[in-house]
Amino acid sequence: MSVLKFGELWHVDVQTALETAFHEALVRQAYYDSEDVLTWNVGMTDATGHRVSRYINNPQTLQHCMNLYAWALERYADRVRRAFKGVKISKAQFAAALSFDWNTGAILKAKWVAYFCAGDVVKARKAFMNYSKPKSIIKRRKAEKALFFDGKWSNNGTITEYTKVSSALQPVWSSAVKIDIRKELTQALMLGGATTPKLDQDPNPDNVPKAPTLTPAHSLDEAIARMDLKTPGHLDLHGVKPAPVTPSRPEDLQTALKKSVKKSIKESVEERVPASALWAAVMISVGTVLFGIWEWLMALPCNLFNIACGG
């Protein structure tokens, strides 16, 4: 097992960068993530110092995305090196800690890091899962924990890309595709993170979103559950207007809104094909069939005995 000492600093190589990217999703134009934070590329926000609002309705090439990702990831890698100063860690541990910090921005204050540096691996392993909110992030946190403490890598060289963004700046889940980014990422890392984008403000990694990771919704219930209903301007239901909501308690607002949205979608579908219209169509069809049978029965004697029947 390769081991890192401070002064023998790990460089961010392709495998390390892929591990973080694997837990994220690539969107080449700006979008709002699950915490209503404007995000771009592989989970990049304004916290990097590079304002991502410039990418609203402005998709970039894959190579540009990887160049900026490599640049930003190297800045986070410096924080990981500081957090484990004087402590031996493996490449897998370095990669896991980097992914953790990219997602949480908490590497310099996380208790699990302090426990590990103090030699208490048992407490460190348990405290690692303190950063498990919202629930959608638990799978990622478990994977990072498995990599840090057990050396189990997750990435396979691919990343999920959402190729479309709605007018409300939400990723279109159905546009998800798997792409191989190793070629472009290798090219970006050959620059050693030397790409220098325009910095609009001082980097502030501690201000990163709680959970930028995106995964496709597999049902209406799941899609609604993931909707960010805090900002009405970001709600895009393709013309469906939510029904009025009167929650009994302020904390019920999110739940009430989501129920309202689901009800509105259902009613919208019913309005497009009213129940009365469906019943009318069914009755007409049944009537047509019965009339045809009656005509056939009336004409049966004539057909059997070759009798000329007139009307």
Image: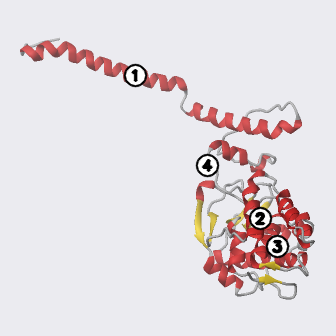
Lower sequence index among marks 2 and 3: 3
Give the foreground label among 1 and 4: 4
- The residue singled out by tag 2 in the image is 145
* Badge 2 amino acid: Lys
Q: Quadrant of the C terminus?
A: top left
Q: Secondary structure at mark 4?
A: loop
Q: Categorize mark 4 by other alpha carbons within 10 Å: few (<14), some (14-19), many (20+).
A: few
Q: Is residue 109 above or below residue 94?
A: above
Given residues 163 and 156, the one toward you in this image is: 156
Measured as percent of width and height from the top left, residue 11 is found at: 77, 84
Label 3: state its secondary structure: loop
* Residue on which the image places disc 4: 218
Q: Earlier in the sequence, mark 1 or mark 2?
A: 2
Q: Nearer the viewer, mark 2 or mark 4?
A: 2
Which residue extends farthest left? 306
Density class for disc 3 (Cα within 10 Å; few <14, some 14-19, many ≥20) is: many
Q: Residues within 10 Å of mark 2 (few under 14, many from 20)?
A: many
Quarter of the view holding residue 25: bottom right
Q: Secondary structure at mark 1?
A: helix
Please give the residue where the numbered disc 3 appears in the rendered image: 50
Tell me which numbered mark, 3 or 1, is placed earlier along the sequence.
Answer: 3
Q: Position of residue 266 (x, y in %)?
A: 63, 34
Residue ID for mark 1: 284
Q: Residue at x 37, y 21 (%)?
A: 286
Residue at point 77% right, 64% down? 145
* Rendering coords of residue 191 (x, y %): 73, 87
Q: In the rendered image, which quarter is residue 179 located in? A: bottom right
